[in-house]
Image (cartoon, rainbow, N blue to C red):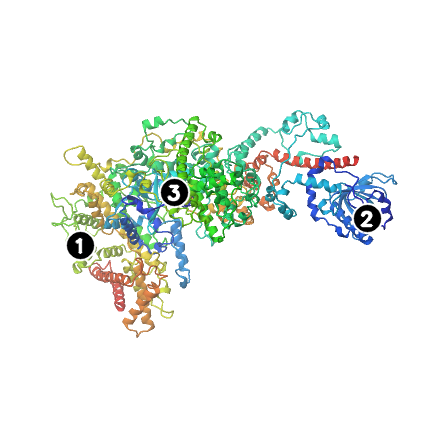
Amino acid sequence: MPITSLESFLFERKLVSSCPIEILQNSTIGIDVDHYLYRIYTFKKEQFLPGIGGVPSSLKDYIHLDLQVFKEFNIKPIFVIPGMKIQIQKHDYKTGELSQQEQHIETTWMKLSNKPPYSYNNMESFRLYSESLPVRPMIHDLITYFIDIGVDYMVAPYDVSFQLSYLYQNNIIDIIYGSTDLLLTQLDKFILGMEFQSKDFRFIDKAKVLHDLSLSERQLMDLSILVGCELQPTMFPIFPPIPKPNLTQPYPQLSYFKMGLDIIYQYSYNNNSNDLYGFIMGLQDPTLLELYQKGHTALKCIPVMNKDGYVELYNVEMAKLGIKNNIDFLEHEKEPESEESTSAGNVVKVPNDVHDIISQRLPPEFYFYQSIGLLPVGLLEAITQGQLHVRPPLESSLNDNYKRLVTSKFYTESLDRQFNLITQLLTRYYGFRKINVKFWFRDEEEKLNNRMFTPVSKMVEKLFIQEEESSNEFNLTKFWTQLNGGSFTAVKNKKITSVSDIISTILLRVLYLYGIVDNKTLKLTNLGKIFQRFVQENPESNNINNLMLLLLLIKTQTIRFDEINNEFTSVPKFFKELSNDESISFEKTKLITMIARVFTLVKLNISPINYQGPISRGLLNFRSFVGYVSNDLIHLFECLLVDFIVHEENNDLRNSLKNKQDWYQLISQLPFYKEVPNTLLGVMVEIYFEYSIRQAIADPTKSKQDIIKNTKDHLLNFVYQVNNTSFNINVNGINSIKENTLFEDFGIGLTLWNDFVKMMIIANDIDNKLVSDNYLESVNEANKLVKEFI
Amino acid sequence: MKSQTPNHLNKPPRFSATSTTTNATGSSPSPSPTPPVGRGNGHRRSNSRYGSSGNTPNPSSNGKSSNGEEKVALVKLTGIVSKAVGKKVTATVSSGARYQGLLVSADTADNSGLSVALYKPVLVQSSPFNDKSNVDTALPEKMIVKLSDLVDLEILKLDILDSTVPDGSTPRKAQTQTATPASIPVSNATPSYQSQTSTKFKTDTDISRSAFKERELQRWVPDDHDVLMNTSLSLEDDFKSNKNNSGWDQFKVNQDKFGIDSSFDEHLYTTKINKLTPEYQERLARASKIANEIESLLTSDRHILEERGMVVDDSGMDEEDKYSGVDRRGDELMAALRGPLGNSTQNVSGKPDITPQDQQKYNPHEKRAARFHNDPAIVLSSATGGSLKSSTPPSPATVSTAVPGPAQPKALESSSPSAAGTTTTTASSTSALKSKPTSIPPKPPVAQSTEQFRLNSQSEINALREFSANFKIPHKLPNDLLPILSKDQKKQEEIIKKQSDSLQALTKDSKSVKESKPTPGPNGSPTNSLSTTTSTTPLLARKKLENTKSTFNPKAASFTPGNVAKHPLLSPIAQKSTYHRPSNTNPSPRVSNQRPYSSSQGSTGTSGTGSSSKRLHHISAADFFGSQSKVPTKESQEQKLKLFNDLFCFFASTRRRFREEKKEGHVTYDRPYQTPPTWNSTIDMSHDQVYPNPDSIPKQAVGMMIPDSSPFMPNPMLNGPTGMSAAAFGGNYGGLNSKLPLNAHQQQLASMAAFHQLQQQQQFQAAMIYQQQLAAAGGGIPPGQSPMPMYSSTDPFLPPGAPSGFIAPPGNFIGSGSGSPVNNHMILNMGQGGPGGGGNPNIGGGPGYQGGNYGHHGGRRYNNSNNNNAGGNKRSN
């Protein structure tokens, strides 16, 4: 969140200048990923993203195109991803309280379900025009992509703008591409917008802005705190709320910054004062005064990672560079403040309660893990803030099954373990401090038991997998075949160095904690046996990680795949009805639901700029289940990995991973690292089978080929309108939906389905409590259905 | 003048009886002389209004036949009478009594004579036959004297404009004729105009156009009578101080002089202040505190600021603009876009000091100023309108500069020394306009499509804008400007030196120009006149001539001064500097901070270089990155990326340090548990202790903002948004706002801001706002609870009814119970053209208000009596 409403105001004041990109030739440019995505994904783009979940499928294409322009001019980008939030950025949700965006999603679903089908996709957006796409769920995907294409990146410890400013002042980068928040940092100019099409960019000269607005730096800070900026996002309630949208003004905006300017001009004019401190005091609200003071402290003391890899406060770092920071204006303005005394002492004033305002401090090692993407940002944030917020999933708050999942003993224990692993490594303070988990639907907070009698690291410290010939390629299939059980011990005098050994070892520990490897005998339990047998029978399968997720989900017993959840709408009938006559039996609908759910785990690689096709809330709900299971798995994995490195158990990874590239190689191969894909293939499959069944009912004599052909035509021409230029933007462009991508992905989904059926048969065979005969029956029925129409 | 009914109308015998006093011809020569000197001439001009409206008797019909004569007489009578309507007349009735009053109407319809109606008749002379006196008490307001009763009608002051009277030989005519040019000096200059428009309604603009010669004002000297009454009366004397001297008591004077017993009681108009109450002092203190607070409220209203004695940037505004004029910004632009064809044709080389613009409908103030200043800086600074016109193609002035010859060395000199093309044009054309306006015959306007004109002027506007950013004064700095620029003697010298340096450089330039003798523009096309002029500067000339075929191009590089190191788009301030303060040395933005308050004065020029931000400027990489050494190269890029990859890694840097210190053995990293959860603080204070003590900050100074977007707009609203926003805040709107409950003051600020925004964005009709406000008034503020506790309704200094006397808000607005005095106060302010000014008397207890009222009443009474008095004087004469 940049300084509220400043950007448009700067354009209005014509303080944004343009320049051709070629000037930036040979430069390194630091990019604020948050701002970058904000510029790409304007309100009009990806309006359905919160309705389908996942990372926007167009993301890679966009970055790819932009990088090509950079390449043309030999510009090297360094992407900086926002890190943890600080205390005053945190919003304390009340029980049941939804954020604006969450509320908006809820109402949009309501609207869509109440709409007549023919107007299904007209101009409803799941996105709030005032909010940009959240970056955090995309971090892992972005990092993998950056590593793939060899672009430098970094996850900032906290705020991006200040980290970028630090890079800039240290001549690591030549220029910054970021948001107006950069005006609050030490720099002279930055790029606000890149027009890759026209090959020019817009930049802002800070001195010019200050001069034109006749503001001192202090005043700009005061004003930003007043209207809200990234580090102090709460707008002071002296401003009116944005009027509700109406027909004439569908996206109302208020120029808060301009109003704030008026305040500051008049206040300083009348009171001969260079700041708004007196003004805030005059509001006579201690909350606001506190916000103001904390905001100022945050703006000055926000920690950044310095060149040595230590995380220090921004003003301390600036002082090291000899930049006399504007810290000393905290002195009363009227006190004679001699230049000599400040420059001689050069003492940066750091109050002794910074940790309360910004964040408690973590060891530099952990900030490093975060900066390369090895530790989830949310986890460290919960540790520093002492609280973990579990927010409702995308399909929103209604579903009891999902609540059951996230509050299940298994998963809260998993959280216990994660925090135990990390806090055990930290100073004792963290070990004693309880971390509270706050679920959005519950009043009381769950206190995590991160002080375990036997620390988790002790439990797993004996488990190793070391291959004779280890490689740097981790293979999940190979991993499962290795798990013959019994002896998971370290090879003496041989340290673990290879990526495959590292990941195998950690994954083994995950399975141990998950109970897939028995805690005493170290033999595989039923769940493990299922996988092992499956891998033995199907060594070629590529779907093992998806099957693992599905089976783990089945194990939670919170959702049965053929169970229809009536709370949520599925794909609207409009897209799958032949006519109104045919009615599909309930049984068949259940089967279709199961098929669609399994297919959902495969990504449909269509990437229109703005998908507006059919969506399903039911499938989104299912995706949330899978997503939670997957996230827990990777989080536990990451914690175990960090624990493994820090304890140096038969490894010297701190030294053996010599440079960042080595670390990148490790990260890029972490299993379950990416976000679960969107639901679109499931949606498509649901349409496919329902439409086919309807055809068969309408005309039993119709041949299988005819039905398949009709269905495909229906999908291509009616649902996705592949050839319709107005619907499928850029028919021939990079973002278009193409016939072959649709059915290729369908094919991939089909292999997953086939493997799923096989796995379910094995599972029923090994443990028919997990997958009952009845369950298997319906899987087989569903498989028949699939075979009938493929 | 005395005019009586014509005697030759034969029918009523009484008329013939009075005919002795009547002129036979019925026309004007009158025994009763000119009006009293004290009142005469000033008023005469206004009579001219009636001149054309009067009936004009036809001279050709005069004396043709007796019947005709009769007719003529009747026509004349009608004419005179019609002019006399509204004048004071004295009518003598058949009884012999004489009545004086205003002639309201007269009836000449029946060809036989006159019936008149008098307004507010006064008995001047009672009937000699009737001894009963004091009939005047029964006189009606309007008295109709019928034809049968009317003996004589004397019109006391009638001025017949002679031009309408056929025979011009009368002395009266001569008199008026001489008088007219004296009082209306403009009439000669613009005869056609006056005859056309004199009958129409005159707008302010019309009136202000005719250049008045002001009369010399004479100091008022009291005559003896007054001196006796008051020895020490002067205008400047304070009311109070006189009271102490028991000086002026208007009631007493009124009673003494005219026997009028005043019933005035100030408590009829205001609440009585009980000064005996024990709380009186306390209340007084509170009132003055409140007044103080109000006076320290923030405002951007220019008038209020002025009232408070603050310095407002009003340069470039004259009195009319400031206090009464209609905001005409944008007119020049419109005019320019329409194309100045029509105006240029008027420019017949006439008087040099009246340019054709003088005769246009309106002179923007910049131009007015420009005409009266010889300082080129001022002329140029106001060039947006003026130079635009003068450099527009068909104008002869511009053409004149385009012919550089020995005959015009001055023009050449002034046109050469500037770096920017437009400077030369404006400067030279202005000076040419002044010095040699007649030397060159006007060129006939070149036929050109209006569209092209529009485009040309558009591009010129752009050019001028750009120019204004880069302009340097090419002339010597006037000495009297120096103390304005800087008070420091040293700095002044510096400026002078700078000036003379650049002047020298420029004169060198111009010399070389003279040698090179640029030929006049290759073709006579007016669009090229500008580039031709610029060709006097050789460097630019080449560039310009290269693309002479193109029209004037505002983007042309010639506007970027070649030798300036920094690009204008970039800040002139050194790289990577920090800004503790605004770039000026003044710690407070007060003095330098003129821009915010001029933001409403037109945004065209204020943003300076930024005005062309959309365009791509050819900034070099060195400009952008600060210096050539900072321009990234491939090597530096590689280096930086390597740095990035090597640095920011805790392990790597530890290893590096380890190597540097050449320690033996295993690298040891900081143990994670060694890092405390706190940061290294340097001072033993919490963050809030760093701030100054709250008590040391003056809290009362907190103000609120008044939208500066439309300071003159009387808008009786503000309560509306209060209600709206309060409701909105209270509702479920905005997750973040619900986090913080509003207190009253914030609510008010919010409403201010909302109001501001509404004004800015939605442009609501006032009427709509009213409706809203009425709707919101019920729910917005809890009834009976004032938003600001300090203005509680129990305050004796704020009688509930008092504010409503100022302006008449809708009845239910006050009555709805939402009437917060504060908001009323604001409403008043808005209505009165600015808060503070109107507000102070209101809050301060109302004496000012009463005073105004009082004065008003007193004035009227006095006037009345004066009228009476005048009547009396008249009669005695």
Point out the tag, 2 or 3, that comes first from the N-terminus. Answer: 2
> Residue B784 location, x and y as percent?
55, 42
Q: Quadrant of residue B562?
A: top left
Name the residue nearer the viewer: B773 or B501: B501
Give the quarter of the figure containing the N terminus of chain A: top left
Residue that sits furthest to the front in the current view: B406
Give the quarter of the figure containing the C terminus of chain A: bottom left
**In the rendering, which numbered label is found on residue B146?**
2
- Chain identifier of the residue bearing label 3 in the image: B
Residue that carries the numbered disc 3 in the rendered image: B540
Q: Are marks 2 and 3 in contact (CB under 8 Å)?
A: no
> Residue B398 location, x and y as percent?
48, 44
- Chain identifier of the residue bearing label 2 in the image: B
Counting the numbered discs, the total is 3
- Determine crowd level at label 3: few under 14, some 14-19, many 20+ residues with C-alpha closer than 10 A: many
Residue that carries the numbered disc 1 in the rendered image: A480
Q: Quadrant of residue B33?
A: top right
To the question of a shared chain for discs 3 and 1, the answer is no
> Residue A263 location, x and y as percent?
46, 38
Q: CA distance from mark 3 to mark 1?
A: 79 Å
Q: CA distance from mark 1 to mark 2?
A: 129 Å
> Residue A153 location, x and y as percent?
26, 45
To the question of a shared chain for discs 2 and 3, the answer is yes
Q: Secondary structure at mark 1?
A: helix
Q: Are marks 1 and 2 in contact (CB under 8 Å)?
A: no
Q: Amino acid at mark 3?
A: Leu
B748 up-or-down from A684: above or below: above
- Determine crowd level at label 2: few under 14, some 14-19, many 20+ residues with C-alpha closer than 10 A: some
